[in-house]
Image (cartoon, rainbow, N blue to C red):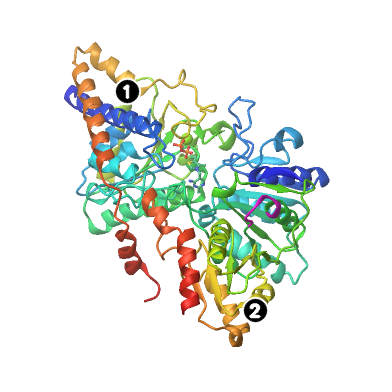
Amino acid sequence: MTTLSVKQALNQALHQLMAADDTVIVVGEDIVGGAGSGSAEELGGAFGVTSGLAARFGTARVIDTPISETAFVGMGIGAAATGLKPIIEVMFCDFMGVCFDQIMNQAAKMRFLSADQIQLPLVIRTSMGAGDSSGAMHSQSLHGLLASIAGLRVVCPSNAADAAGLLKSALSDPNPVVLLEHKGLYDLETDIDPALPAVPIGQGKILIEGAAVTLVTVSAMVHHAVKAAKQLEKDGITVEVIDARSISPLDSDLITKSVAKTGRLLVVDEGAAFGGFADMVIAEVAQKAFPHLKAAPRKITPPHTPVPYAPSLEQNWLPSTPDIIQGVKDLLNA
Amino acid sequence: MHGKLLAIYNDALRIRAFEKAIGVMADAGHVPGLVHLCLGAEVLQATVCNALDSKTDHVNGSHRSHGIALASGASPFKVAAEILGREDGLSSGLGGTQHLFAPEQGMASNGIVGAQVPLAAGAALTAKTLGTHGIAVCFFGDAAANQGAVLETMNLAAVLSLPLLFILENNGYGLSTSSSYASAGVNLTERAKAFGLESISLPSNTITDQIEQIHIAINTVRTESRPLFLEAPIPRLTGHYHGDAGNFAGDTDTVPDPLLLLREFLDAQNIDTASVKEQSSTEMDEVAGRALRSQAPSPQILDTWRSILGATE
Ligand SMILES: Cc1ncc(C[n+]2csc(CCOP(=O)(O)OP(=O)(O)O)c2C)c(N)n1
Ligand SMILES: [Mg+2]
């Protein structure tokens, strides 16, 4: 066991992937940093995830780009279709708005439209999440939006082992995979296996077993949910906490089995209040576990507004541990 | 002319004093996120906005637009309160430093690099369609110049002959990346020429020439109702955001501080600049202090917005 932050685990996984396969390239804005500045210092990306890669593997494989998301994301897709294994960094998932055609029409559809003649060993790494007053265009959680596009795989790790392990699986997957890394989790440390074993895409994980309520969550909200479950346990309420990890494909088996046991579902998510991950999970459960339900499934999400800037508003906007505790109690009384 | 120069100097000084005050607030932990200060761009922003008419003209800026807001006539107190995330802010603290909206002054800024440029084309189209004789101005950085949205808009504005002034603030860097690395081709002015735009690269050493050329450019866009491109050299006096290590800051030897150049020019004409300098820092320190005393926005505002934007209920 070794103690690594999410950022460090991702960095080490990137080192391992690049060392193991010469066709792996890493591309993005300021991922080396200081290009053309005359400074030998590396920035290693806005969040430092790619640090040290250029020094070790060279700037032919670790490529800083102009601020041209459409061009470099598209280039990554084209390279994936023709023999490379690109890991593309989009600094904030909000910036996918700039290059959405490449993601939605090009990456997502190529395997299908070519009838599997072309597969895409492509990973798009990006950051997500609110909580640091970055404002409405640097704070979104777009995993639900991306997961609604057939052809994309979408994963949201909540810890270092899953971040590194999902990155590895993502690169060997024949589909383009979007890996959404929560900004608020980059420095979160956990004890993990230093080999950073691959974590299969499409498998959720039961973090805490419980009998009263199934609580499905993902990314940073996992940590609020675990805290809430521990508090509720003191009141004799046991909550089964599931970290979905993968948004698409969703591990609906794991979720429906849990609901068959508890009869109650609460989804906690930082994404969209309407048509997002929470609604997807509720729809799955409503269709597959309806006879087991003792109460209507519920969700806790931010309100259906853009992310506000003021810290007081942003904290109010985000679901909190007390919100989750209350949500579980309300569900039990429903 | 000297009266005009003194007015520009005064506006530019006020912007610098404002940014310094915001920097102090940020160091004291009162600015919630990262702020991008516009140190070095004050004279350009003041010169342009001074020559605009807020009743008919529109100006859009990037993530680095505090100065444009002030120069457009937005209340410094409201801008400061927005940056601090307070209820007296331009948008009650909803938007923040990168998303400044002052529609009465015809001003807006943007958090997505390059996104403000097509929006400015829209303002130019409105002015043209309604026959207001207004113009639109967009400010963007040398790194934004590589965004498809920016390049597409240059073409579109030329094709539709929109009264749109493109102003490229070239500080040589986008975040940590030098434009010598990120931008191919001879230079960005030459690139704009390829779209058929009249394109001017402002001189970095003679500040009065710079100011005069900006005035001529604005006049041309207005009277001839066509787009024009200006490239302005901007010294990068701080790093990308306030408080970053600044290891990738630019080289001020090649691009002198325009505010200093303007003061030297005015001093040489025996025009008193000392008193305005004093006034601007007193004003902005007071403004920042007042913004700090403004309340946090009421959480009710989220309920209001939820009912305005809600997809259900
Ligand atoms: C679409 C998009 N990509 C990347 C960013 C992150 N980012 C913010 S400012 C910036 C650099 C912009 O440089 P430039 O346009 O030269 O403006 P400057 O900061 O130098 O004023 C970057 C990469 C962003 N906000 N939006
Ligand atoms: Mg720049």
Q: Report, in whole angstroms, how far the alpha carbon at label 1 lies from the one at label 2.
A: 71 Å
Q: Are marks 1 and 2 on the same chain?
A: no
Give the answer, above or below, for where A89 lies relative to A109: above
Q: Magenta residues, as a range? A: A157-162
The numbered mark 2 sits on a residue in which chain? A
Residue identifier under label 1: B259
- Closest to the observer, B226 or B102: B102
A328 falls in the magenta region: no
Residue B117 position, x and y percent, is: 40, 48
Residue A14 position, x and y percent, is: 73, 45
Task: Give the number of the disc on residue A261.
Answer: 2
Looking at the rendered structure, the kind of residue marked 1 is: Leu
The numbered mark 1 sits on a residue in which chain? B
Q: Is residue A246 left or right of residue B25?
A: right
Label 2 secondary element: helix
Q: Residues within 10 Å of mark 1 (few under 14, many from 20)?
A: many
Which residue appears farthest toward the bottom when viewing the image?
A291
Residue at point 53%, 72% (across, down): A266
